[in-house]
Image (cartoon, rainbow, N blue to C red):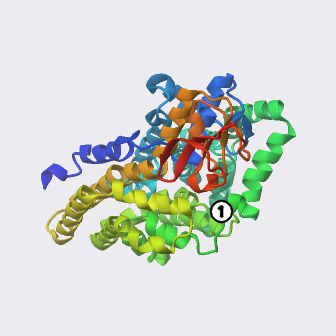
Amino acid sequence: MKIFSLDHRWWLVGIVLFGFFWNLGNAPLFDEDEGFFAEGTREMALRGDFIATYVNQEPRFDKPPLTNWLQYLSAQLLGWTEAAMRLPSALAALGWMLLLYRFVRRALGEREAFFATLMATCSLQITIIGKAALADSLLNAFLAGAMFCLYEVLQKVTFKYLLAFYGFTALGFLAKGPIAVLVPGAVTGLYLLRWRAWKPLLRVLHPLGMLLFLGLALPWYWLQYRQMGQAFIDGFFFNHNLNRFQTAFEGHYGGVLYFVPVLLLGTLPYTAVVLSALGQVRRLWADRYLSFHLLWFGFVFVFFSFSGTKLHHYLVYGYTPLFVLGARYLVESKRLPVMWPALALLLLLAGVPFGLPWVLPYVQDAYAVAVMQGAAAEFGLPYLLTMGLLMGLVVLVGFRKTWSQELRALLVGGVLLVTVNGLWMPRLGNLLQRPIKEAALLAKEKDDQRLVVLDHYTPSFHFYSGRFAQERAPRPGDTVLARKDRLVDFPTKIILYEKYGIVLARLPD
């Protein structure tokens, strides 16, 4: 169908914009991570201090502040809304896709660039993380730019790519820290070992590039150290970076195979495509360009598989090369194995809300029971009918072999985006975070002086309420945000708000 030919890239542009900007503010901020960043930005503005990050008046050393700075600028345009907090990530994701398209087209061709960008945009994990109010979208955009430029530098002396490599790496270092240096550094070493070439290392280690990196990245680190002293070194470098690799940080642990199911789910509906591409490892290993991408993905997968701390979004750092390899496979094989993976995901998402009543008798956590019971109010018959229509479209695409690969891949990707961004995430937000937001807005109106948050950390509560709260056992006279079952020892409490297991209550004096 000519309208979908690659001479007209507007279809790809449209689905990228749709994937990362549609429904941007339609779900409340998710705790803990989105809440941490948004509240950290709010307190930066409140304190007038754009060097150190605080959440609920406590210093945070988790991440550098680039995301917070961009969120603040966004808030000046859009107000202190969910869309404003997520806009920097969405813009970074747009840049990420533009870099992917440009460099893959340069190295492999137009069709490969189309498929790589489409699969990255529409994969399950990237469409979620790409616009979340976190640092990960920025890091992945800068990491992709750095790695693409790095490959160019490894092949020949190209001054503009050298400066771009160090610029992207410095910005990544300001977005999330040492990982922005670790991945390019490790892949450079592995690539040079693979091809037994050492002269390219001299091109990479260019003094002017290093000066550019230091000029962009060093000032904030120096100012933060001047302000916070050794607490910054211990908290950021040792605790939140080195200790994350050595130990299971904040309870995020898992075995060495932790990222196998993450990969299988996170790349849906294109899982079979990337697995088929990885199945050609011998052929990939023999090609300079493809081996670079194989080493990029392989390092990320192996490194984080042996890290003490396991978080699902760590694997996204290796998704960009994975979709490049998948695009190469699609163009050469002319197959599109997406129907069954897409159907499996849609069936799972359609069935889970309606299977919860069968699970309830076996759940002991009272809060989890309240959330599962609330699912009936969020996932009703319209949801099920819409899921049925989307599954029908996927089946139609699967059997329309006369349609082009591009059209079928685009339709299946569009189904995934509608399902995740239009049907699931808003409803999940209503179940898990809408009660926190509504309780926070009520607390903001009442302006009680003794506000307590009990047992579960919800930084979005501070963002929405504009209030600070103590984290301690409640006492008479307090206004408390808690899960309902945690207040059973206070039978005379006054319920100010209650929904899906979340309670805002005042304890009489």
Closer-to-camera residue (357/145): 357
Q: Residue at x 60, y 36 (%)?
A: 462
Specify whether residue 289 is in view.
no
Residue 432, placed above or below residue 219: below
| Quarter holding residue 49 | top right
Of the pair 142 and 426, the residue shown nearer to us: 426
Pointer 1: what residue? 252
Task: Please say whether residue 334 is visible from this viewpoint.
Answer: yes
* Coordinates of residue 425 in the picture (x, y in percent): 40, 52
Q: Position of residue 372 (x, y in %)?
A: 44, 62
Q: Quadrant of the C terminus?
A: top right
Amino acid bearing label 1: His
Which residue is the extreme one toward the front?
492
Residue 102's spot in the image, x, y percent? 40, 46
Please report the residue visible at 21 percent of the width from the left and 58 percent of the height from the top. Answer: 407
Q: Quadrant of the N terminus?
A: bottom left
Q: Secondary structure at mark 1?
A: loop
Query: Does residue 191 lie above or below 473 as drawn?
Result: below
Residue 383 vertical position relative to residue 480 in the rendered view, above or below = below
Q: Position of residue 79 (x, y in %)?
A: 47, 25
The image quarter containing residue 353 is bottom left
Q: On the image, which quarter does residue 249 sit in? A: bottom right
* Category of crowding for the residue at label 1, using alpha-carbon neighbours closer than 10 angstroms: few (below 14), some (14–19), many (at least 20): few
Q: Is residue 449 left or right of residue 110?
A: right
- The count of marks equals 1
- Against 346, residue 96 (above or below) is above
- In this rendering, would 341 be left or right of 282? left
